Image (tube, grey):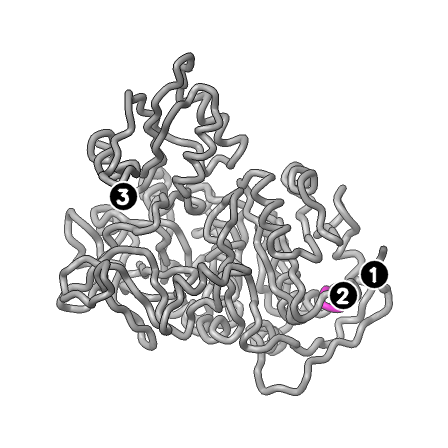
Amino acid sequence: MTAQTTAVEVNSPSSEFRTYVESVLDVLSATPDRPVITTADGRQVTAGEFRDDVHRIARELAGWGIGRGSTVSLLSGNRPEVLTARYAANLLGARAVFLYQGMAPETLAHIAHSVDTELLLVDPGLPDAAEGLLAHARPPYVLSLGPGPHGQDLLARAARHEPLPVRGAARPEDDWCIRHTGGTTGVPKGVRMPHGPYRDMLAFGSVGAGEPPRFLACTTLAHVAGNIADATLLAGGSVVLRQSFDPGEVLAAVERERITHLWLLPPLIYRLLDHPALAATDLSSVRRISYGGCAASPTRLRQAYDTFGAVLFGGYGQSEAGHVTVIGPDEHANLPGEGQATVGRVIPGVEVAIHDELGAPVPAGTVGEIRVRSGQAMSGYWKQPELTAEVLRDGWVHTGDMGYLDTEGYLYIVDRLKDMIIVVGGHVYTSELEELLLTHPAVAHCAAFGVRRPDAVEEVHVAVVPAADGSPDLGGLREFVARHKGEMYAPTGLHLVTEIPLTPVGKPDKKRIRATLGS
């Protein structure tokens, strides 16, 4: 079956609501000759070209039946088309789902199938990843973001349309995306993120990042970098794309492109600080370095403050709860030399409460579960009503994270109820790693746990009881895990033990394991 080739009139029912896409397109239309995207190979895309591409792609997608309630999944690197195609899908009222590079093919296929993907868009520069995905699942339609071996060329087909404006069809309650909380081959949690809060949130995404901001996207546009790209364009700024993070290339790009804004996970900040080219790099253009996503070392944050100046913006958030706290540039000067770094204070319009295991509020300084009430909260988990009811209760998101508020209102994260390990690239769910390892013939029993290094970066470790005839080694287990779950799940440390200690109720005693083996 092929799509219609004639232009399709796409209109939304009358409504005062305007999507974030329409707001961005308005900004682009005001200065159509202004460069807004610089690709990894140095090509520049003007505001007018970007706007026209969104409308052309929207008309082409409409010809394939994409509209409100449709799911468009994207498997792509950092290229302009991943933004224009996502904007086009959202403009039509379809939801976007991001398939992360580095996940195992089975994981990608499971996610694509679970969200009822109607149209899969693939990057022709990722033929192996696309081939692996399509070997396990094939959505009704597959198109390529340029000439490639998988599907017709979406860009060539879209170029035949006139760039006539397409009115937004989405409503505030419609999903703009479903974001998955981790790479799993079981039942991943797809977080439904509605249009209304997202549009409002973008207004704050480039505060302090320069006028106009110039953002370097050196991590995947499928996650936070994509959100900041949206905020940058909405603020009248421009985006410079890199395909991946390389500290030397990032430093060179900051100087060459006069970058004002970077988003980095803390371990990536450390890599910049440790790079030999740092001392000779002109960083005078940088106005904001946003960070988050995992624990950060206060010692290294102080080093970053001393190196980059008062430009650090940290914070805490969840896909389920939205943006919760912020710690601003000047506050980094007061971080402790050791111990734990705060994730800042609660932002306006958000409420945080700390409760014990019985659901009672606890006083300042006491650790409990963090609960959040916010207009940014998810609509729920995709097709998991029981889990949604468990996490969303009485207007509060039960985050599963453990922390405390001090007497000045600063939030500290100390642990997680949910047994997962936060690594660069995503979340490792220990139960799923353990279930996989138990299928290995050399493993009789195992327990996976996170070990936090001195710089606060977490690593995946496993304690393994060998099978009677088995002799597991770290290299072999890493290769086995990477093949089935992706590199993100591959353990860094292997501990051979005679037994796995258990709690009184018979569960693996992770605290004891970590205390004994994780040092």
Q: What residue type is labelled 2?
A: Gly
Q: Do the residues labelled 2 and 1 touch (CB within 8 Å)?
A: yes
Q: Earlier in the sequence, mark 2 or mark 3?
A: 2
The quarter of the picture where the C terminus appears is top left
Q: Which amino acid does label 3 sit on?
A: Ala
Report the number of numbered marks.
Answer: 3
Q: Which residue is drawn at 14% across and 66% down?
A: 363
Q: Which residue lies furthest to the front in this view?
A: 505
Question: How far apart are the alpha carbons under marks 2 and 1?
Answer: 8 Å
The quarter of the picture where the N terminus appears is bottom right
Q: Which amino acid does label 1 sit on?
A: Ala
Residue 172 percent coordinates (x, y) = 54, 77
Identify whether 71 is placed above or below 424: below
Magenta region's main secondary structure? helix
In the image, 418 versus 282, the foreground residue is 418
Residue 112 percent coordinates (x, y) = 62, 51
Q: Name the residue under label 2.
A: 65
**Left or right: 28 as drawn, with respect to 346:** right
Q: Residue at x 22, y 50 (%)?
A: 298
* Magenta-tinted stretch: 57-61
Question: How far apart are the alpha carbons under marks 1 and 3?
Answer: 51 Å
Q: Mark 1 points at which residue?
A: 3
Question: Residue 117's image quarter?
Answer: bottom right
Q: Do the residues labelled 1 and 3 touch (CB within 8 Å)?
A: no
Q: Mark 3 points at which residue?
A: 456
Can you see residue 513? yes
Residue 259 percent coordinates (x, y) = 44, 57
10 Å crowding of disc 3: few (<14), some (14-19), many (20+): some
In the image, 435 versus 313, the foreground residue is 435
Callout 3: helix, strand or loop?
loop
Q: Earlier in the sequence, mark 1 or mark 3?
A: 1
Query: Is residue 402 within the magenta segment?
Result: no
